[in-house]
Image (cartoon, grey):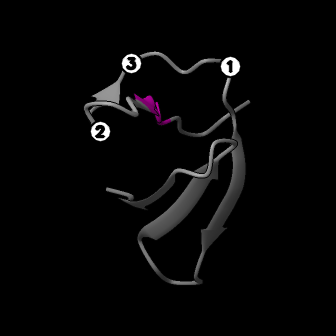
Amino acid sequence: MPITSHKFGSIDPISSKETDDDNGQFVSSVCWRKNSDMLIAANSSGCIKVLQMV
């Protein structure tokens, strides 16, 4: 059971804007540091996001 979720979306290669279509992608890596509220996640297409947990 997940404790949180975040929608990555996709980047349109022509406009470089984020879309809501995930094309079957999945989160393949998550990393955080002890006593930090920051989280780094990467999806299967190579998109990396730095998230702040609030």
Which residue is the extreme one toward the bottom?
34
Quadrant of image for the N terminus:
top right
* Marker disc for residue 16: 2
- Residue 3 against residue 31 in the figure, above or below: above
How many C-alpha atoms fall within 10 Å of the one at disc 3: few (<14), some, or many (≥20)? few
* Marker disc for residue 44: none
- Could you tell me how far apart the alpha carbons at marks 2 and 1 are, in whole angstroms? 19 Å
| Residue behind mark 1 | 24
Q: Mostly what secondary structure, the magenta segment?
A: loop
- Check if mark 3's residue and mark 2's residue have beta carbons within 8 Å: no
| Residue behind mark 3 | 20
- Residue 34 against residue 15 in the figure, above or below: below
- Check if mark 2's residue and mark 1's residue have beta carbons within 8 Å: no
Task: Give the quarter of the image for residue 32.
Answer: bottom right
Residues shaded magenta: 6-10
Q: Nearer the viewer, mark 3 or mark 2?
A: 2
Amino acid identity at mark 1: Gly
Task: Give me the residue at 38% from left, 29% from top.
Answer: 12
Q: Position of residue 15 (x, y in %)?
A: 25, 31
Q: Position of residue 39 (x, y in %)?
A: 50, 65
- Residue 45 against residue 35 in the figure, above or below: above
Task: Give me the residue at 57% from left, 56% from top.
Answer: 41
Amino acid identity at mark 2: Ser
Quadrant of image for the C terminus:
bottom left
Task: Give me the residue at 60% from left, 54% from top.
Answer: 42
